[in-house]
Amino acid sequence: MKRLTILAFGLLIPVISFSQQALWGGSQIVSPEIHDNHTVTFRLRAPKAVKVEVTGDFLAPQKMETPYGKFDAPGTAQLKEGEGGVWEYTTPEPLASELYNYSYIVDGQRMNDPSNVSMVRDVASVSNLFIIPGDPGDLYRVMDVAHGSVARRWYDSPTLKEQRRITIYTPAGYENSKKSYPVFYLLHGSGGDEEAWIALGRTAQILDNLIAQGKVEPMIVVMPNGHTQNAAAPGESSRDYTPAMGGGPRQAVASMEDSFGDIMKFVESNYRVKKGKANRAVAGLSMGGMHSAAISAQYPNTFDYVGVFSAPPIASLMARDNVDATKAAEEFVQKLQTQQKNGFKLYWIACGNTDFLYQSVIDSMKKMDEIGFNYTYRESGEGHIWKNWRIYLSEFAPMLFK
């Protein structure tokens, strides 16, 4: 019996050792290493690899063809193998302050950095991230300030005939006060879901930091799932699907615009919110920008603040030389005229000058100019990327509820 006990203990040692390594050990490699001069070193132990590359948005972009034109894709750089099979690459120049995403390509296979536990999902791809301190990078970091809360809630949507998942940010102090707050509805793009803005957009960090600086009014931020065929992000509902641009395979029973009233009803019934259009804002990126324009037009006296990021407000103008699209554009322009007649405080359009939707945005604004529609346009560099959308959020939020 004693010998069996010793044997059993001996067999458990490797398991215990492995568990302890997971708890206390892990990789001894530092990667990424952000140096004082803001150059960055990436390291990966791969002694059997033939070729190791790093790809990320900190590198010069590569052009990729899309149905809408050329699109900026992350660049690549090759690591060099050193002692002990550790591959290494250091950026030749300091990196500007920003949040960056990256991953490795090892002999043609994409993988994440095992030395960096900071990861984020974009559509179906998971990558690592790091932040270079400074401006605007410090806005995206967790700083020593009062923090708001982030909750994932389920709400009933009679229009879509299902329970749906939503992400809601409440500012610091919400739980311990009886104060009511304005509401900002923030919508994701075609490849996103209710997790996109909070994870990739760093909404909680941006709001926490700007509120602490006194630049933003404390507000509730509501981030719904804009794909009406999906109840929730992948892995968060009973419906299994692979995330993809445009959402999942289920046939939607209604549009985002038609079902948006269900979201507002849930928020205003379950949170202490200030009522009235002066206390409501809606904004979104790409598909979410089109949703924001359509929702604010469909509910023309509901929002005083509208933000359209990297998207044409008149979405039907993207389908040029199409009779139905032309008719749809004319009908939408009529809605814009009603919206302007009812009045609003800010209609803010933003787009990068290399965005593949740039021309569609310009075409929309020309049509809006024809009817004298009052908007503000903010043009940035670069394209259809989260770097721009985080900047737009950090600029749009301080203009709200003033």
Image (cartoon, rainbow, N blue to C red):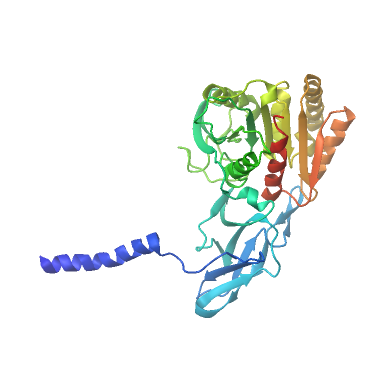
Give the image location of residue 184, x and y in percent.
64, 32
Q: Is residue 338 left or right of residue 113?
A: right
Q: Tell me which corner region of the image, top left, top right, bottom left or bottom right, holds residue 34.
A: bottom right
Give the image location of residue 86, x and y in percent.
53, 74
The answer to whether residue 276 of the structure is visible from this angle is yes
Q: Is residue 384 left or right of residue 218?
A: right
Farthest residue to the bottom: give it.
83
Q: Is residue 242 left or right of residue 23?
A: right
Q: Quadrant of the N terminus?
A: bottom left
Farthest residue to the left: give it.
1
Q: Residue at x 62, y 23 (%)?
A: 274
Q: Is residue 19 left or right of residue 338?
A: left
Give the image location of residue 351, x and y in percent.
77, 44
Q: Residue at x 66, y 64 (%)?
A: 38
Q: Nearer the viewer, residue 29 or 309?
A: 29
Report the number of discs.
0
Q: Residue at x 47, y 38 (%)?
A: 237
The answer to whether residue 319 of the structure is visible from this angle is no
Q: Nearer the viewer, residue 326 or 153?
A: 153
